[in-house]
Amino acid sequence: MNRIIVTAGATYLDIDAYACSIALAELLHLKGIDAVAYSDAPCNYSVCPSLIEKGLLVTSLPKEIEEKAKYIIVDVSDPNYLKDNVPLDNIIKVYDHHVGFEEYWTSRIGDGTNIEFIGAAATLIYREWKKAGLEDKMSGHTARLLVAAILDNTLNLTSSNTTEEDREVFKALCRKESIGEEWCAAYFSEVQKSVESDLKNAIFNDIKAINNNNILPSRMAQLCVWDGEGIIKKLPEIRQYFDGKDNWLMNIIDIKHRCSYFVTDNSVCQTGLEEVFGVRFESGVAISPVPYLRKEIIKNIISKNIGG
């Protein structure tokens, strides 16, 4: 059988994509399958230094292996984000929690399609470990990666996309590694330090292009940190990163205070966000008493039929 490459095929890796790639490759190895976690994309701020172990993620492959290998894709299913990095005809499985491309993949790979609304792709990968009955053989490092992925993608289990399965998987992994609240807080604190040490790259390594939306600007950034107030203090600096233009929106998720800061100088966007979320902008900043993921913001605006 040809080697299996587990990858996210993205322009950058967040902690969910990073953790899923490594965790699934480890599982396949335990099952006697030749597999490798691979990506040449840079990690974003959510993959903090203490969670990186050299050698687990391969960053380059010989061309002949890339062309002959079979691919398993994690944490992404939009073919537009894959076609430039992964040969679509060589993909045999997809695991993603971003819905919308189920029919596309089912028509191509049938039962290899694992796309469903759930908090973290990490939860889907842990499900595969349970199916194989190999949870007890999972390395401690992989377990911690999956915990961090669930924390980040569910906003410390507070976001509306968090499912009961996410919570159960989180508890099981925490029990396995004796992880408590202190470890979780330390993860978000380390992420914050990483963000603040290189703020510009942290922002632009997690920015989404927005098209055909009457409310949202063309660029939407997101930061998920322990204490958002530290980032708000740097707004003069952040505005300079965007060259003084108003074609951007930043969602700063504050885990400690369980809120989101919406930051934009775009008046149309401000009006739309005030209408949808019941917030009030002052000096370009509005505080939502509920933390929202970027995809939740987009979904809410579209559901109100005001975002195009």
Image: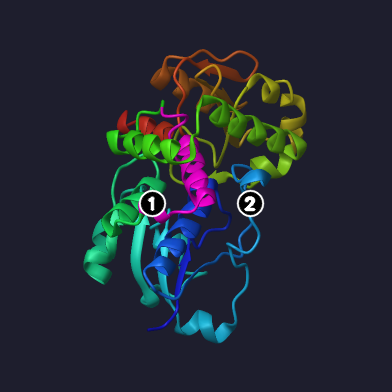
Q: Is residue 11 left or right of residue 279?
A: right
The spot of residue 2 in percent (x, y) is 41, 83
| Residue at 68 percent of width and 46 percent of height | 49
In space, the residues marked 1 and 2 are separated at their CA atoms by 22 Å
Nearest the viewer among 170 and 71 is 170
Q: Secondary structure at mark 2?
A: loop
Question: Mark 2 Cα within 10 Å, few/some/many (few <14, many 20+)?
Answer: some
Q: Amino acid at mark 1?
A: Asp
Q: Is residue 109 toward the left or the right of residue 197 in the image?
A: left
Residue 154 in magenta stretch: yes
Instruction: Indicate which label's residue lies in the foreground, 1 or 2.
Output: 1
Residue ID at (72%, 40%) = 200
The residue closer to the viewer here, 254 or 123, is: 123
Q: Is residue 210 visible?
A: no
Q: Position of residue 308 (x, y in %)?
A: 37, 38
Look at 50% across and 28% down and name the residue there: 180
Categorize mark 1 by other alpha carbons within 10 Å: few (<14), some (14-19), many (20+): few
Mark 2, residue position: 52
* Range covered by the magenta-colored residues: 135-157
Q: Amino acid at mark 2?
A: Ile
Q: Which residue is mark 1?
A: 136
Residue 63 can be seen in this image = yes
Residue beneath the point at 40% across and 28% down: 159
Quick check: 119 left or right of 293? left
Q: Secondary structure at mark 1?
A: helix
For the N terminus, which image quadrant? bottom left
**Residue 108, position as x, y percentages in the image:** 27, 71
